[in-house]
Amino acid sequence: MAVYLDHNATTPVHREVVEAMLPWFSQRIGNGSALHSPGRAARAAVEKARAQVAALIGAEPDRVFFTSGGTESDNLAIYGSLGLLGAGARFVTSAIEHPAVLSCAQAQEDGGRTVARVRPAPSGRVDPEALAAACSPGPCLVSLMCANNETGVVQPVFESVQAVRAVSPQALFHSDAVQAAGRIPLDVVSLGVDLLTLSSHKLHGPQGVGALFIRQGLDLPPLLHGGGQEDGMRPGTYNVAGIVGFGIAAELAARNRAEDMEYVAAMRDRLEEGLLRLAPSAVVLGRDEARLPNTINVCFPGRDARMLAANLDALGIYVATGSACSSGDDAPSHVHEAMGLPADLSRGALRLSLGLDTGEDEVEEALRAFGQVLGNEKSRSGSWSAAAGRLWKRSSPK
Ligand SMILES: Cc1ncc(COP(=O)(O)O)c(C=O)c1O
């Protein structure tokens, strides 16, 4: 039995989503900008999906702009805001953001902008006061993710918005909610954010479609110029099938989230406890913080995560290494580095992310495979690496 434990990379598309999308590939033709009946029907389907996505995050539908995914939404939010705020504006973000944000930060810094990257506590949580302290009273954009893709640690976005606004009332606040959407409750009004990034394929929708929430009254300059779709904010022919699928996925996530995530969290806890029984020296990152219900970032001291992942792969268990989440390189994880995690622990870190398709049988199968690839953990417990793990655990704040 194969067990897919990489839902933070991408999720299987729900059957209902596939069924809703299929007609838009062939039977139902029509460019959503065309004025004839099929075109108007396509546009109506896009608008229905906009309302479904907006409902997931408590937004007005006309404040949701469809894009090609999380990466584009992050770029649009950051380049758009900084373009609006001007050359003197500061960009404050955390050191644990996804590369879609951190690469923008680097490009902005290379272009001469002042950029601050705030490090988290060793637990993986960013301190709102530290973010606020990095802001200036002048124009400023802050970007803090809702939940980290490697550790699953939920970030204090609401508290950070409050802290930042106390220092810089005019600051714009963006949050990347790609991993959080559909997994924890999200409401743009109560969070108080100006911009929020979503991606369909992390919540059982299709790949290649996402959205950016832009609060009312915020007129960003677009990244792309063209035919005027999405109120000119994101021109280009509508990806009707993808947008329809995203809409259904968002509706299902909004309707079933609480129950579904309770189940996923129970499976996550079962897997996590089983792993810690197999490998008592293992360290689970962010365990004392609020975490996404589906994510385990676990370090096996003295082990090479790539070897473990390859051996698990051979047994049909698909996991991610914490250190090579996006590009496949073997540089240490920037998230672990920012948390101050010893390199030995980071080298042995795996990210296991569960989904609705991860049931008890999958958890048991995964644990069997882990038992095989980890071998006799007890014989290794006197090693230098295990000691490093224990030390780090002790120094991590609760
Ligand atoms: C936190 C976060 N932001 C952005 C992205 C990029 O989203 P997309 O794959 O839709 O471009 C990802 C993808 O892994 C992510 O985890």
Image (cartoon, grey):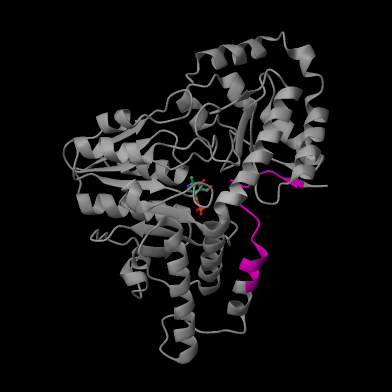
Question: Is 371 rendered above or below residue 207?
Answer: above
Q: Position of residue 112 (x, y in %)?
A: 25, 40
Question: Is 334 rendered above or below residue 218?
Answer: above
Q: Position of residue 282 (x, y in %)?
A: 66, 22
Residue 115 in sight from this viewpoint: yes
Lateral position of residue 361 relative to residue 346, left or right: right
Q: Could you tell me which residue is drawn at 38 percent across and 63 percent down?
A: 64
Residue farthest left in this picture: 138
Q: Could you tell me which residue is drawn at 38 percent across and 67 percent down?
A: 61
Lateral position of residue 196 relative to residue 122, left or right: left
Question: Is 62 rendered above or below residue 214?
Answer: below
Residue 114 in sight from this viewpoint: no
Q: Is residue 13 magenta?
A: yes
Lateral position of residue 252 relative to residue 58, left or right: right
Q: Position of residue 10 (x, y in %)?
A: 61, 51
Q: Could you tell me which residue is drawn at 38 percent across and 46 percent down?
A: 175
Residue farthest front in this picture: 259
Q: Nearer the viewer, residue 322 or 261?
A: 261
Q: How many numbered tags mark residues here?
A: 0
Q: Position of residue 108 (x, y in %)?
A: 31, 43
The quarter of the displayed image where residue 89 is located: top left
Q: Which residues are magenta?
A: 3-19
Q: Is residue 369 magenta?
A: no
